[in-house]
Image: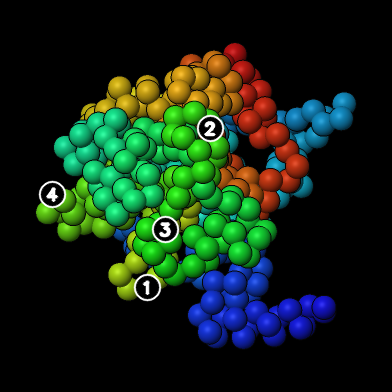
Amino acid sequence: MGARTLGLIGALFLMSGCTVGRFFMYNFADTRDHKKFPSRELAPSAHPFTYPIAQPEKAPKTISKAGEEVPFDEYLERHATVAFLIIHRDTIKYERYFKGYDPAHVHTSFSMAKSVMSMLIGCAIADGFIGDVHQPVTDFVPELKENGFDSVTVEQVLQMTSGLKFSESYVNPFGSAAKYYYGRRLYKNMARMKLERAPGTEFEYVSGNSQLLGLILERALRAQGDPRTITQYLHDRLWSPLGMAYASSWSTDRKDGGIEKTFCCLNSPARDFAKLGSLYLHKGAWRGQQLVPEAWVARSTMVDTTNGSAARYQYQWWLPSAEGDFMAQGILGQYIYVDPTRELVIVRLGRKPGGVPWAQVFRSLGKAYAR
């Protein structure tokens, strides 16, 4: 079947409002998807924060590849990077943009949004909207009781140990991920969630957990008579106090009456993504305000292998080593990396991973800046 035929089939599906049609028409996830989907606006802060910039910059000159020293700028560009920031001790020491990007260029987070959802759950507990992580999911989403979710806790959803049945494939147009990413019926799809194993027994990274966190937060706000959307709650609780400087957004499943795609799709420039990392570098405090409880930050980023949990993943954050560093990570090579020991935050945004073990690169850079 030729490309033209596939395109015509995709167009027909799209005109009928079909998820599969949108999958073929958009031809897999890419970094321009935030322009294709409806979204809710994240306004910049009335008091934007600007990182100081080191003069002169303290930039990595070269990187070793296959025994050869390659200029670092060239290495980044060659490997599909569009933005790269190194922030050491709250000062930008290195900043580069490629492929027409600049500091104001909006880029989608993909699954880095999962870590932001973790922040919001911690805030919601501090604000009294959620009691604690041991509450059953069905306290907030009672319709899932008939599917066995009364035995699933908020913590198990955070840790990806809920036992949720979900296909994480991004290349299968009929899989769960495609339905959630391209579909316009997230509420309906979430109401049909099922379990495939006992909760608290095994780690499995699936985006359905992070979308369920979004529904839990939305329901928790509604239960207390709070009319704010998830985007508005993010803006009030974190976005504005962090001094975000650029107009941003969070993609939704449909234009009217939809819900944020909380497993992905927070859209912002690199410097504002970096502030999320800086917030956690400072244990949830920022410019004199404790925005996220310090204990929540610590719990979210500690190694824990009990109750089926994985050493490399906690509360929607990846843990690349046992040395205290952690990162938000998204498909196609999006990263917010934090190394508290070395007072370092790195943001890498890209059109694809570029075949690079980025966590190793970040760790080696951290060691260099610690000297």
Q: Earlier in the sequence, mark 1 or mark 4?
A: 4
Alpha carbon separation for disc pair 3 and 1? 22 Å
- State the scheme by which the image is colored: rainbow
Give the labeled residue for mark 3: 192
Q: Residues within 10 Å of mark 2 (few under 14, many from 20)?
A: many
Residue type indicated by callout 4: Gln
For this orientation, the residue located farthest to the right is: 67
Q: In terms of depth relative to the viewer, which is nearer, 49 or 167? A: 167
In the image, what residue occupies the spot 29% across and 30% down? 134
Q: Earlier in the sequence, mark 3 or mark 4?
A: 3
Query: In the rendered view, would you say 72 is above or below 300?
Result: below
Asked if the residue under mark 4 is in contact with the one under mark 3, i.e. CB atoms within 8 Å, the reply is no
Which element type, helix, strand or loop, lies under badge 2? loop
Asked if the residue under mark 4 is in contact with the one under mark 2, i.e. CB atoms within 8 Å, the reply is no
Mark carried by residue 255: 1
Q: Earlier in the sequence, mark 2 or mark 1?
A: 2
Residue type indicated by callout 1: Lys
Alpha carbon separation for disc pair 3 and 4? 25 Å
Which element type, helix, strand or loop, lies under badge 4? loop
Alpha carbon separation for disc pair 3 and 2? 21 Å
Q: Position of residue 180 (x, y in %)?
A: 49, 60
